[in-house]
Amino acid sequence: MSNPTDPRQLLGADPHTGNRKIDPVTGYDTTGHDWGGITELNTAFPKVVIWALVLTFLYSVIAWILLPAWPTGRDYTRGLLGLNQGEEAVSDFRDLSEVRQDWLSRFEGENFVALQSDATLMATAMPAAARLFADNCAACHGTNGQGGPGFPVLSDETWLWGDDTEEIATTIRHGINTEDPDTRYAEMPAFDWMERSDRLALAEFVSEMPGGAVDFESSVGTVFAENCSSCHGSTGAGGLEIGAPSLTDEAVIYGQNPGTVMQTLRRGRHGVMPAWNGRLSEAEINLLALYVARLGQPAGGGQ
Amino acid sequence: MTETLSISERRIGVVLSVLLALMGLVMAAAARHGVMSTHGFMALGLGIGLAFLLAGALYDPEPPTDRLRRYYDAPTRFGIVMTLIWAIIGMGIGVWVAALLYWPDATPPWPATSFGRLRPVHTTGIIFGFGGNALIATSFHVLQRTSRARLADSVSPWVVLIGYNLFCAWAVTGYLMGSTQSKEYAEAEWYADLWLVVIWVTYFALYIRTLARRNEPHIYVANWYYLAFILVVAMLHIVNNLALPVRWTAAESFPVWSGVQDAMVQWWYGHNAVAFFLTAGFLGMLYYFLPVRSGRPIWSYRLSIVSFWGITFFYIWVGSHHLHYTALPYWAQTLGMTFSVMLLVPSWASAGNAIATLNGAWHKVRDDATLRFMFVAAVFYGLSTFEGSFLAIRPVNSLSHYTDWTVGHVHSGTLGWVAMIVFGAIYTLVPQLNGKTEMASLRAVEWHFWLAVTGTLVYVVSMWNAGITQGLMWRAYDENGALSYSFVQSVEAMAPYYLLRTIGGGLFLTGAAVCAWNCRATMRGAAGHAADRPLVAQPAE
């Protein structure tokens, strides 16, 4: 078939005319193809590309030999290094944990007084606690524990279950209104059955309690005594440590203007604090409890 | 549109439009409410509108018979208009969501405008709306010119373009209504996916039929790339979107894949969407418009062929590099990593071939902003493919994964490479198809070029910084073995980069708006057809 004397069959010759165009810039001839003015140079295949292919292929072969690489039916080639990413992850995690274990393990017990009096330990632990707080608590309670709409302030001195570090640790561990068997319960029932006029009067009454200018002998005072005092105390000062807040200190989570109190009366409140048991270690929970307790101290704790 | 169709073609068009309207009616009636019903009404409205448009022109005179001796450019013109519309929508939403990351409080209170629903509107609007329309429009042009033949028929290009844009509109409106199958770049629900299959098969058939009529002995390499784009995207789309609808009358569905298999299929799709949608098709564009605009021969024929096969062979393996350090077996990660490294060679060979093609035309690169767009595209193609292979290496990925470095990498490819080559192609095509020699305003092209380059650099550099900062902050431990930073500190550290990113995106969007205005001004004073013609069959010697 091939006829070497036929110019149309030479490499790069136009199959119809046998012409070969030489490109004046590069000195190469063209392949002879012409697509509406587009031509291609008959440039020799660049050696560097072959070398690059060889090099990257060598890299791949080495990787295939050393690492798990090719599937072989139900199994795969394990690689000479015998690496297993699951084991690697676990051992890396273990190495990291060991570095902090020598100080973190001291938080496994609950002797908070002793822990807190160890200044060196606190200097090591509190920065770590601050990050732990920022990663786990700040989304609801604010970066500095300043609270948020519907979420309690942790940086004041008002506590529903008291300011003991043990109590704070219990709240973190088991949560409030969670499915944890040892959860704390705190439920403000709905008073939607109550006459609206009574609720309005009560809301007005409660909103004025922080100012102290309320008359418990009035008719609405009687409504308060009959419906609210069993949890909030006869003067509304709370302090029963059953999750019912004091109504006299302006520290109510949901706010204390007549509008929000009306909302609270009509629908009740059933806020949830998640249980961190299982997600955080015992030591981490105690560490956080200490950090949170210090947030509430006037001198300021962790940060 | 109608004046380029013969009366019998208009009749076919009326029938197809009525069928589309009927399909929409059935969808709307069967679903009764919800996303699918809204989408049914959209199809119904489009079908009725098209039926009126075509039926109203049914008795207009036949187009001149010499049209068959010309290339059929009306669909390309329409596709370019859609490209520009989607560019403004997609980039506009992109800048808006970028701004939301800096000013999250500015999020409006409606579900439809939440970040999570707007983000896929940006990605789909850009990849499928802007990129897809540009690919289809230019593929019709390149296919005809390099085959020296008119499109095989005049109806199916319109079916492809209008049907494809209906898919895009369904997709983005669905996301706004909260409808998604939660697969990256494949969020559209099952009926939209099926519709796209029909459109895509029509597209493939049209391409092959036209190619079969070519008056050139060889198939130009641009067509190889476009064909790879059409064929492989069909394969990826079908496999990744295999899903079982919850009901035939509702939008929701379950994918047939589950667990790590689903993740692997998704990223096999996802990465090859990058490979065959955002790379192969646009390389086809580059291989045509770069030599045309520079007037230079392709530097190496051999290199273009080897690169083509290298890219198609290596790319299909690399999707697993999106799943490093996950539940995906280690061996699949190793394969993804090594093939990604080998992929660099044909990628750089293509970029090098493009840049070497400009030898002898550097004075044009200096003077002509349109050619400069293509040159910058080739440079960014080289940069992003290097970055891609680098990020695919497992230990590098452990730093970069889940950070904004990935976002920066994607945008170095999409802004620097894909959008730049599209703008280069548009500035070459729009004057030509409207019988002019140049765009209405060359100064505007120059402005667009510098806005686009500045915007891209600001965006990409800020995201590199952002991503590396995040990666380093997340893995930093202090001497006591505790994390050095909380997550929210790494978020706060992003503020300056997110602001810069918004500014970079805003510059790029401004450039695109200038381009749209310039194209409108050029098209408005259209002086006629493209001057070039197909080869008319020669009698045998």
Image (cartoon, rainbow, N blue to C red):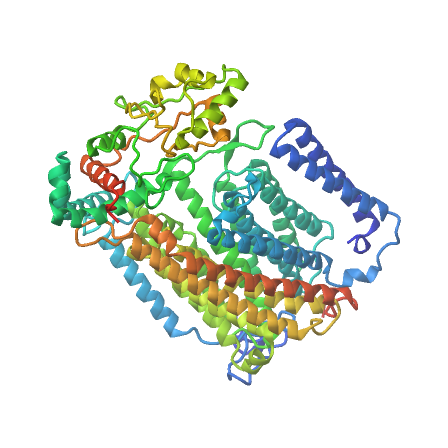
The picture places residue B144, in percent across and down from the top left corner, at: 67, 62
**Residue B189 quadrant:** top right
**Residue A33 quadrant:** bottom right
Q: Using the rendered image of the protein, determine whether residue B409 is visible from the camera's viewpoint.
A: no
Indicate the quadrant containing the N terminus of chain B: top left, top right, bottom left or bottom right. Answer: bottom right
Indicate the quadrant containing the C terminus of chain B: top left, top right, bottom left or bottom right. Answer: bottom right
Number of numbered discs present?
0
Which residue is at the front of the view, B355 or A93? A93
Q: Is residue B315 above or below residue A5?
A: above
Q: Residue at x 67, y 31 (%)?
A: B28
Which residue is at the front of the view, A10 or B472? B472
Q: Using the rendered image of the protein, determine whether residue B138 is visible from the camera's viewpoint.
A: yes
Which residue is at the front of the view, B82 or A149? A149
Which residue is at the front of the view, A163 or A177? A163
The picture places residue B104, in percent across and down from the top left corner, at: 48, 49
The picture places residue B223, in percent across and down from the top left corner, at: 58, 60
The picture places residue B453, in percent across and down from the top left corner, at: 52, 69
